[in-house]
Image (spheres, rainbow, N blue to C red):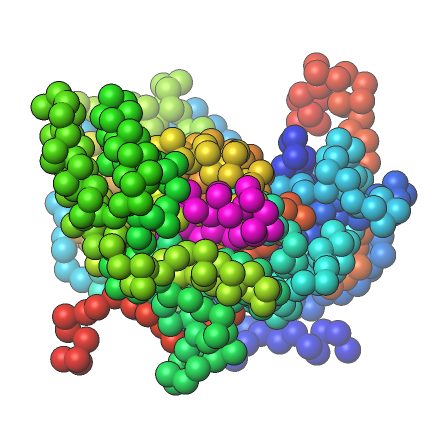
Amino acid sequence: MVIEQYTITEKYNFPQPTIDTTLPQRFLEQSLYSLKQAQHQPFQLNPQTFQQLNTTEQYPSSIQLKPEPIPIKPDHQETLIAAVDTSTIKIGETATGMIIAVRGATTWKQNRAYKYTRLGPFIFHITEENKNAVYNTLEHAYFSTSYGASHQAAPNIMQMPTRLASLLERWLQTMLAKTVNHGIILFDGSLISGTIDTPVQRLREILSYARRNNSTVLAFSKATTLRANGILITEQLPNHDPPYLLETTGIHFKSPIVLLGDVYVARLNKANLAFRLDIDKETPVEQRMAAIQKLIGNDLYTQSYPETLRLSHILCTFTANEVLAIKHFITRKHGIQIINRPDMHKLLFGPFSKGEIYA
Amino acid sequence: MKLYKKEGNILQIISFPAESAEKGDYLLVEDQDAAKALIAQVIDVQFAAVPGVLEELLRTLPDGGEPLQGEDIDPMEIAPHITYIQDASLLICKIRATLENEMLSPSSSWLPSRSQSTIKKLSIPMLMKLAKIDGKLPIILGGTKDSSLLTIDASAIDGTLNIITGKKGCGKSHLSKLLMVNLVGYRATVVIFDLNGEYTSLGMSNDGKRNMYYDKIHTLTPGQNFKVALEQLHLNTVMGILVNALHLPGTSAREFRRIWKMLKEKGKLNMQELGEAIRDLNCNQHVRDALASRFHSLANSGFFTDCPGEATLLDESILKAKDQGGAIVINLKNTSNIDRQIVVEYALGKLVDSLSNWKLKAIFLFAEEAHLYLRETYWDDIVTRMRHFGIFTTFITNQPDTIQETIYRQADNIFLFNFTNEHDLDVVSRAARVDAETVRSIARDLPPHHCLTLGKVVGDFPIVARVRALDIKTMGETRLFFKDMN
């Protein structure tokens, strides 16, 4: 009955009215269902942000970085730039699990103005008992095709926040890929697939939707561990005026990891920063270059990083104020009481305690 | 509301949007286990330092300051909770008293429980009841924010030194009229030094008809219906005028005293004879010149007459006001600076005379912009010596720095209207019965006609009230050039 009070608002038709809203609907249902289980449980506030890192990135030793940069000339032809990012945070702990929040944001620049749509936050009470049910229900909600049941089996409870965020992110990416025509879609991270939360087929499908709509997917990684000759690829910048790309070769991952993109190093302005850039392998080279030229001709990139993607990240990130608001929400709406358990590290080690992370 | 911090006698209280509290409001912080409560007044309202608010605001401004446009799909409806947290305010409150066993004490030395204390608004009537601000001679000053009346007792003004101050046009004269007519209503004798002729119509209502005070208002305009004959004056009064108002040097004053005695013995104490006596005086040229110039000042003032029938003695008006109460309005409008000082010197001298002879029990003196006619040495005289004779003064000014600091220190009641100038607020905050933070914070935001009442009349609980309207003909309006053109 409670669930019926919450429905995805009908105006959510980003950007086409034909979008399937099953996933956000299931997110909401699972969220409320899980919170109902936590009702009247004492709850320890312990906000902790999770970084969605590419933990599966392996380090092929055969990587080569072409020394000759590919110069880029900005193309100011009006082009839609869209980006997606998601964020997750652990709000606190209950006796049986933890309370987390997930949120996603899409931003786009059109007619010289940035606009956004934020989805969430969705708040979940994740326990050992409900983690499979919650995750699998969401997996099957939108991605009705199961890409190998083994991927969804028994995620570690500590991985649940990033798994749920990843699920939402892939859904938002799919929505953009399906709806943006002749545009540039920016992803946060790489185009690596075959990982526990990104089956190859799923990412392949997203990229193919984008190609079908004549859009190009550019995936920017804020950090990379890829090294050529033992040095990070983003730290081997030639003495050349930006903007430019550096091409890499020889990146091969062991199965089941599949890289669906070609990897470049992008230095977009004079700021001495460069980022790993993955571009869909199946996109013709001319289209790739045209896309990157349109990106720098249409978007801002003050830190050598596209503003649209930066905004997506900023908009989905949880602020301390929002954590307090979520705490207020779960206390008021779901009767979950905050308790202050003693911090064992502080209790035992006093000023020498550096918190759980360093334990 | 939640108790957040206590530093000295300042409390910091977190208040959420639904719990509206404004500057000037009183809060009761009750600790049931301790069986005590703190009475605190909100002196400032700030945003609570909620973590993450800056990030929240910054991320809506991506570039060039243009707000980012977008849509938030928030199916769980968290946004109202975010707003609720974001809009939390921090109330800076001054502890005014501790309530224990229904008794108030000025202590703030104990610490109420942060987690268990309950905080609620304290209405002004309840505060007045707790502070036992009542009496048999109520004066309704006006209405408070919670729609109750702020009533003070006339006896709390008795024997006190009061200051009414605020910037131009905020209602100072209106309040002083309100106090005056109420005091007159309680049969008090009130004397007003009316600089702008504003109080001359106290006996008329707005529609120009006579009101209930008509017969009790005695307006004396120097040179018109207020003149004195020398023979009716005491030498000390005249010497006061010459020395204090006209700055006659000592040697010349001695000479004048001799002339006065000589004329009195001859029964020729009038202006004409005095003038001739000075002219014929056989003495040092400088002394004669000094006396001659003072004589001309007296003669030119038009305040002195040789015709006893023309003379109106202040004593007569005082006698009229003595039994049934009344206000003697000394209209100083259109009077030159020197003449004003002559008249004031005479009036104060006569009042002290009447009071020291017990012809009068006490009087309430209202002095508007007193620095324009009161000599330097009179300030201390008024608050110390004259108070013992029974002159209880209320100073009314829009230039608080013209009143000496010693006056502020000894003021029993201050009726403070809006001031925005820091310097003015600093001056007023020197008053002994008030803390600087309260004055600076509350007075700055007072709307017109709202008055912060401080001191004995409100049991030292500063209270803001909108001064009530009076059905008295307004005379204090500024003459405007463009008034009829609109």
* Position of residue A276 measured from the top left corner of the image (x, y, whole percent): 35, 37
Of all residues shown, which one is farthest toward the left?
B285
Query: Can residue B473 be seen at all in this image of the molecule?
Result: yes
Q: Is residue A4 left or right of residue B226?
A: right
Q: How many marks?
A: 0
Q: Residue at x 34, y 27 (%)?
A: A233
Above or below, B386 against B185 in this view is: above
Query: Can residue A162 be seen at all in this image of the molecule?
Result: no
Q: Residue at x 65, y 30 (%)?
A: B8
Q: Residue at x 85, y 56 (%)?
A: A40
Identify the magenta region.
B348-370
Q: Residue at x 14, y 80 (%)?
A: B485
Above or below, A84 against B371 in this view is: below
The verdict on residue B362 being magenta is yes
* Position of residue B159 measured from the top left corner of the image (x, y, whole percent): 60, 46
* Position of residue B204 measured from the top left corner of the image (x, y, whole percent): 41, 78
Foreground residue among B180 and B284: B284
Foreground residue among A25 and A91: A91
Foreground residue among B49 and B373: B373
Residue A251 is drawn in which quadrant? top left
Foreground residue among B208 and A174: B208
Q: Is residue B182 left or right of residue B381?
A: right
* Position of residue B170 measured from the top left corner of the image (x, y, whole percent): 38, 60
The verdict on residue A198 being magenta is no
